[in-house]
Amino acid sequence: MMRGFVWQIALTLVLVLVGAALEVGAAQGTADVWPALGVVAVAALLAAAVATRPLTEAVVLFAGAHLGAWLLLSGITGHEGQAGASFYLALAGAWLLAWRCVTVLSAFKPTSRQAAAVLGLVIPVIFGAWILIIWEAIVRGAGIPFLLLPPPSAIAVRISASAAILAADVNQTIFKAVVAGYAIGCCTGFAAAIAADRFVFLRRGLLPIGNMAAALPIIGVAPIMVMWFGFDWQSKAAVVVIMTFFPMLVNTVVGLTASSHMERDLMRTYASGYWQTLFKLRLPAAMPFIFNALKINSTLALIGAIVAEFFGTPVVGMGFRISTEVGRMNIDMVWAEIAVAAVAGSVFYGAVALIERAVTFWHPSIRGG
Amino acid sequence: MIPEPKQAASMAEIKNAVIEAEKLGLTFHTNDGPVQALANVNLSIGKGEFVSFIGPSGCGKTTLLRVIADLEKPTSGKILVNGMSAEQARARRAYGYVFQAAALLPWRTIASNVALPLEIMGVSRAEQAARIKRTLDLVNLSGFEKKYPWQLSGGMQQRASIARALAFDADLLLMDEPFGALDEIVRDHLNEQLLELWGRTEKTICFVTHSIPEAVYLSTRIVVMSPRPGRVTDIIESTLPKERPLDIRETPEFLAIAARVRDGLRAGHSYED
């Protein structure tokens, strides 16, 4: 198979050559980028040589990109803030190799289910890893102050060193406040939507007031909830309830109108009652809307609980930790909490999205037709 | 003044009428003022008849079917279905209704879609299974029980929706342009199957269409309607035998009836424009 010109490889070689030329003229005693430049150049040439076999090319690119990045990062140790242009050129070269690697992998059409699953995981992992690598390299290469932005490696060290504290915070904020508030908020929002659907006076009266609840500033509500429900997780759950109630209410109300006139006429021809029509037609048809609310609420709930902890809390919890560690200049701990919150939020969202796929398998957006 | 339908009166004396309409009228109140969808419709349909309603769009044929089904309320006149009011008849599940689109619920399999009316009517599980099998056999969809509607072709979906309308064994079948969205070949095939099904089940069928060959091929009686206001302009008794192969459509008898239907449709328009 003939293959065209691959611009990532070509550009990598150009960058490496320019980097090498600059390095020859550079002052001694700074970071040693020669090994990285060499590895990147060899990997680029090797990849071009084996381009007819995509899997081999991907492996070569993967190894070259990451070995190059590792050599760069270990070379900069002890020379933080002294990186020259050749350092960044080598980094860009390694990154281009990784880009080419992801491009090659994305073009694969795996035949087996397992291969597709592995590929679906590997591609975003490489992508995410390079965000961290570039972050690490720039922060250390340019010597950005720790307070401003710590390198990811320092955040990782902090996470493993403070695992027990982080676990206690997650337990307090997520497993108590978020879960309770999310469950209550979503359930009451759903129940209110059914009630508003059943009774006209509620539809006219409740929806505008629900709208107002959504507009309540969380900063103002949180201290009041602390006064009402105390310092512990109950007051944070109350804030989460207020935040998640309205998206669920509005989405469910709209979702209940999602069934077509013809489908509702069909139920009428069967002399179907209100509840039968609700359970057999209107609620299933509303499921895509309800899951939209569940997904929106999964992230809102986390934000609500963390922010609410800024306004009085026992000495545990993610929001509490963030607010106090900022004051103590322990920025790596703040970042550690942010990282944990991001992962927890993604897992929460992902779990809801998985359930959605199973429940609304019939919807054109999911069955793909 | 609305002219009296020419033949309507002569049809009034049918015995055991399944559907009786007397001076039926329906006016929709829209933002652009009142729209008279039906005016002075007199009609009587006997048990076991296959009656087609034909006319240009806007002639009220679908509205008439919806009035029979109690999906619209008439604003004047009287409608009786099985000797009771349309509302009572609907409450007693007197009819199965087939819509222009299949309207199958996408989250239910074909079998479970056919079971929908049975679940609502509280039929036992065992009886449901038996009826699903029987009605899917009737529309030649055996083997597709576990498929979802979106996995089937349009013609198969419409057959599934007919199976659903047959599942609870109402004696009356109301069909609103059920094959309008399908191509000619599938349509011919389904017309043939529908006739066969009608012959086997002896149900009364009201069938809305705007296709003259379809109306002539299927019906024992053809009700020709015209628009603004929607009214009956002619009622034509078919002289075709009950056994109707598809090539009956080339016979002079068939063409004569078709010509009369066409005349009726044209007459309905003549004093409109």
Image (cartoon, rainbow, N blue to C red):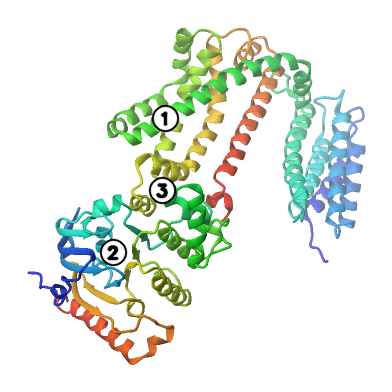
Which chain does tag 1 point to?
A: A
Left or right, B273 with respect to B88, comes to left
Type of amino acid under label 2 = Thr
Evaluate if marks 2 and 1 touch, with contact meaning CB atoms under 8 Å apart. Answer: no
Residue B189 position within the rendered picture, expressed as x and y whole percent measured from the top left = 47, 76
Name the residue tied to disc 1: A191
Q: Secondary structure at mark 2?
A: helix
Vertical placement of residue A128 versus B182, above or below: above
Name the residue tied to disc 3: A259
The residues tagged by marks 1 and 3 sit, at their Cα atoms, a distance apart of: 19 Å
Left or right, A27 with respect to A114, comes to right
Which chain does tag 2 point to?
A: B
Asked whether A36 or A98 is in front, the reply is A98
Left or right, A327 with respect to B16, comes to right
- The residue located at (89%, 52%) in the rendering is A45
Quarter-of-image position of residue A91: top right
Asked whether A107 or A227 is in front, the reply is A227
Crowding near pointer 2: few (<14 within 10 Å), some, many (20+)? many
Respond whether the residues carrying marks 2 and 1 are from the same subunit: no
